[in-house]
Image (cartoon, rainbow, N blue to C red):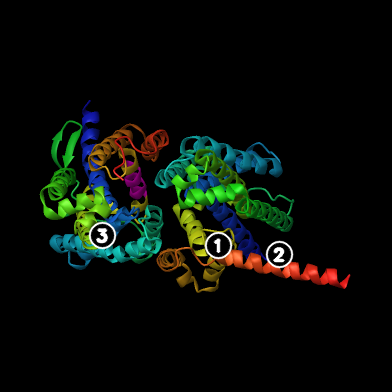
Amino acid sequence: MPLSLYYFLSITAVNILLSWAMYLPYRVAHLHFITVANMAISGYSAAWLVMALHVPFGWALLAGFALGGGIGYLVSLFIGDAPTFAVVIVGFTFIFITRTVIENLNAVGGTMGMFGLPDIGGNPDAHRWIIMAILAGLLLLVGFLLHRFDHSRLGRAASAVFVDKDLAASLGVDMRRLGMLLQTVSCTIAGGTGVLYGFIYRSLHVDFFTFELVGIAMTIIFVGGYATQWGTVVLAPILYGVPLLLPPAVQEWRIVFYGAALVLVLVLKPEGFITRRFVVSIESFLSVSRKKRNTLSREDV
Amino acid sequence: VQELIAQVINGLSLGSIYVLLVTGFNLLLLVAMIIHFSYPQVVVFSMYVTWLVLQLTGNNLALGIAAGVASSVIINLLSAPLFQKVMSNRREVDINSTMVLSMGIGMIITDVLSHSFNEGLPVAFPDSLSSIAPIVRVGLISVQVGQVWSLAVGIVAVSAIFLILYKTRPGRAFRAIAEDPDGARLVGIPILRTGLYSYGLSGVLGGVIAVLLAMLLGSASPGLGEQVAHKVLAVSIIAGLGNLAGGLVVGLLLGILEAIAQGYISGSWSNAIAFVVMLVVVLAKPKGLFGSKL
């Protein structure tokens, strides 16, 4: 697999997973930026397990998921039903503290970072294919779970909380437990994504987990459309891919473009490009054509 | 003991900057009803404008300071229609959307500063503005010009804001909108125009803070705004969103805590200590210590 294609596909997948991890708690209006800190914590922990303790990659990946979920659960005990701005500041503070701890920990390379993470399959090509396969599997799994969630009673409860908390409470929605569940799942996804992020580059540096990463994920969610999971899927490859086609001098300004896109979309098209109505119309179109196909095939019989 | 006193003096001057930042932030929150998360980024942008004008005019302080204040006011006023459009899209006050919009503006400002000024490197202010020479020295205790200015201007500016809020007609309009926007509209207060005044006033305050920060720190970097933004939002949440008096207390306490941590703990750990304390308080009391005014 060509290196450029590998990086494009794998980083796009990471961006989608991270954005989905943020999208999930945003269903109850929580901007859960702790996901980026969890990516760093799990990524570094897994890399340390593999390099220092020679733990197999599979176990380190599972540990990354578990660590992310564990931290997410513990934090959600306090902010499961907190106001959005409190959730935001907890996330930012966590990122800052995590970065400081990593920068001062010699065991994980401090400010130099960790380099030379081992190839999973024994050689670089196998490593890339294995990483791609895991990312594809994870995308399918998380995408399927999100789709089911959006069409479940829990998803409807989350929508009620997003629109009107008083209404949701009067309908009997337990906002704290719902918030805790979504935050924990979100952090679990972020933990695993962080491990894979490190193994894509086979190195980790504290600057991989900056507020810029938060900005990229937010742009993907809000420009793509925060009301469905599909906006993320459409926008992640575009946002990452288009700047790669531009001259390097223009590429440098990509964060300005992301910020401008975010501002313009919030002002002009607040629901983003892929709206819930659009997704519902596609789903109903697909369901009608499926019904027609079934009727035709029955008539043929 | 001398070291502790020295750090408390440092903390008071730093805390007075936090107080000013939180006051500007809360003013926008109460009157314009937005969470202007990137307000500190606007302040850092003004610091860069001040630096640029000082470079171009051969360190003309008056022009540099005027340009810093003007840039802050202009950015605030230019961003006002964006915030108002977002709120009219939702047909209601939507604090979350305005916060995301503000983060977008912050992304643009930080990245522009990273590319357009001094090749992305931190900028250093001339000695005429950021003199670090002590004016008083007693043992380990030394008081610098910037510290005196930030404390004095902090007291004057906060007093002026409170004076405007409680003794003037526009101030009464500000408080009426903060208490009850619909009621304020009913009694004929022009919500839009009064909101614009708050953007202008917080812009002026932002420019003053930029000059004080330049005097106190002596330098600025593109990432400074992000770091300060988190602290300002945290101070505001810990105090209780929109609580001006609470912001005053918590801002000063954070400044002192940070300065003491810097005095006794090495490197970046000192900053982390302040963040850990903020995290613990936010986790324990997500709705603030002094009660939210929203």
**Of the residues shown, which amino acid type is indicated by label 3?**
Ser
Q: CA distance from mark 3 to mark 1?
A: 40 Å
Q: Which residue is mark 1?
A: A276
* Residue at point 72%, 56% (across, down): A133
Task: Residue A87: give x, y in percent of width and height.
Answer: 44, 44
Tell me the chief SS of the magenta region. helix
Q: Which residue is mark 3?
A: B46
Q: Is residue A69 above or below residue B28?
A: above
Residue A53: quadrant of the picture: top right
The chain ID associated with circle 1 is: A
The chain ID associated with circle 3 is: B
* Residue at point 61%, 48% (across, down): A153
Task: Residue A244: give x, y in percent of width and height.
Answer: 54, 69
Quadrant assignment for the C terminus of chain B: top left
Q: Which residue is mark 2?
A: A1
Quadrant assignment for the N terminus of chain B: top left
* Residue at point 36%, 33% (across, down): B265
How packed is label 1: few (under 14 Cα within 10 Å), some, or many (20 or more)? Answer: some
